[in-house]
Image (cartoon, rainbow, N blue to C red):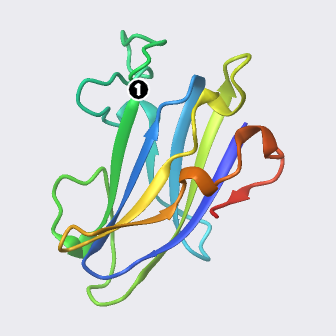
Amino acid sequence: MRYWRLAVTVPPESRLEIEGTFPYARQMGFNIHRAGDTGVLGSLVDENLRPNDGAANPFRPGAPRLDRNRSYRAVIARSDGGLAEADTIIAAEANNPLPLRILFRIYLPDRGRPGGGVPLPRAFLVNSAGARTLVAGGESCPRHGDVDPTQPVGAT
């Protein structure tokens, strides 16, 4: 099992977008916590994630498990953001920053595919004007082979 930990503060009138590739694994998902709190505010479960246009979600019943086009995008929005298309909406006071801790888990990756055989997801803060800022993921994150499976990995 692998965990990737992301600590991010979502400013007022902003949202968090996560882009990734479904791993070759038994299960994957995101748990969303308010920073400093142990309770789960929300979760994004593998079979509920929407694949990008033309992509497949291999965790859905009947979907092609080994399809190579397996990208997704998930939106985590504040309740005051007025975004109806979000995958998860977190209650937040209108003018206060929303500090979040997000745990991404890959459970039982396929044999020969450490970390699920895909790169770590990328996370973007998106403001009300649509400007995107990369806050984690991409080239600067550790490779799956460099990660101790017993130690959570923080975002770079």
Query: On the rendered structure, is 2 left or right of 43?
Result: right
Image coords of residue 128 (percent x, y): 20, 74
As helix, strand or loop, the secondary structure at mark 1 comes to loop
Q: Position of residue 45 (x, y in %)?
A: 45, 39
Where is residue 149 shown, x and y percent of the image? 81, 43
Find disc 1 in the rendering and name its residue: 70
In the image: residue 137, left or right of residue 126: right
* Looking at the image, residue 35 lies above or below residue 3: below
**Vertical placement of residue 14 versus 29, above or below:** below
Sort mark 1 into few (<14), some (14-19) or many (20+) by Cα contacts within 10 Å. many
As rendered, which of 38 and 114 lies closer to the eye?
A: 114
**Image quadrant where one finds the N terminus:** top right
- Where residue 96 sits, quadrant-wise, is bottom left
Q: Pick the residue in front: 49 or 139.
A: 139
Residue at horizontal 34%, vertical 44%? 73
Task: Give the residue displayed 56% in from the left and 64% down from the top.
Answer: 39
